[in-house]
Image (tube, rainbow, N blue to C red):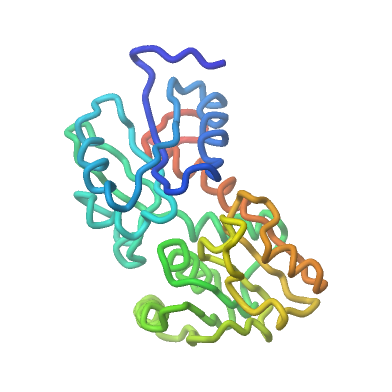
Amino acid sequence: MKIITGVTRVYGILADPIHHVQTPQRMNEHFAALDHDGVLVPLHAGADTLARVVEGLRGLRNLGGVIVTVPHKTAIVELCDEVTDSARLIGAANVVRREADGRLVGHMLDGEGFVGGLRDAGVDPRGRSAYLAGAGGAANAIAFALVQAGVSRLTIANRTRAKAEDLKQRLARLDPAAVVSVGTPDPSGHDLVVNATSLGLREDDPLPLDTTRLAPGQRVCEIIMQPRVTALLQAAAQRGCAIHHGAPMLAAQIALMARFLGVRGPTAVA
């Protein structure tokens, strides 16, 4: 077990619920590999207390920063003093660095992590059609990353259509030539089907899309890591689809998050 002392650098992950997070295990393994004296712990904060929690973090002088996950990725942007250009365009952040003076700087790595996880699994999005369920923080990041990765077309389906339309318009600013449409719960006719909502974290959650329209030849992807096999992935497998679990997205982000948080080591940048 790691020995924690008064000079150990502290990091956290903000989430609600918190039971499903796997970032502490992965990041602490990464810290150990870099011989970095730091520890990342879960911080359970609800939407009603997030602003107060974040304000308190500014005063923790041994805090290096926090990872941010469901449901705070969008709200955290306005609570930071500064966010990167990409996070501002996406409208969400999932990692926040605390500067020495208490200023908070946010960035978004979910999209890069998702596409990196696909490529690590031998799947290149370039030239493939993609269906994306969701238009929240993670979905925004993944949509931008898929367009940048060269998907042939992207369909966005969200319960609130206005949010999907807003995302479509922002994607047009990134790449006016991108083929983006707002869709329905029907994911048929797409090579990649991605659930970028939080539906699946709880046993009683409804499915994020119409699984009866899935067919062999499609690859159905999750961003949820716990449970490993969500109801969506189970239904997709039963219909003969290839499935892609949520864990690779996190695995592809760990080193990137550590670098943004200022962790120095063999894989970190100056």
| Residue 128 picture quarter | bottom right
All told, the count of numbered labels is 0
Whole-percent x, y for residue 73 in the image: 37, 56
Measured as percent of width and height from the top left, residue 172 is found at: 38, 82
Corner quadrant of residue 269 = top left
Q: Residue furthest left?
A: 101
Q: Residue at x 19, y 49 (%)?
A: 81
Which of the image's four quarters has the C terminus?
A: top left
Left or right side of 229 for 30: left
Horizontal side of 254 relative to 188 (left or right) equals: left
Establish if 118 lies above or below 190: above
* Placement of 217 over or under 120, stated as above or below: below
Describe residue 9's horizontal placement relative to residue 81 as left or right.
right
Q: Give percent across and percent down for residue 232.
A: 67, 66
- Of residues 152 and 138, which is closer to you in this image? 138
Q: Residue at x 54, y 69 (%)?
A: 149
Q: Give the residue at x 48% y 12%.
A: 3
Please provide percent x and percent y for residue 123.
Answer: 69, 64
Q: Residue furthest front?
A: 204
The quadrant of the picture occupied by the N terminus is top right
Q: Is residue 163 above or below residue 182?
A: above
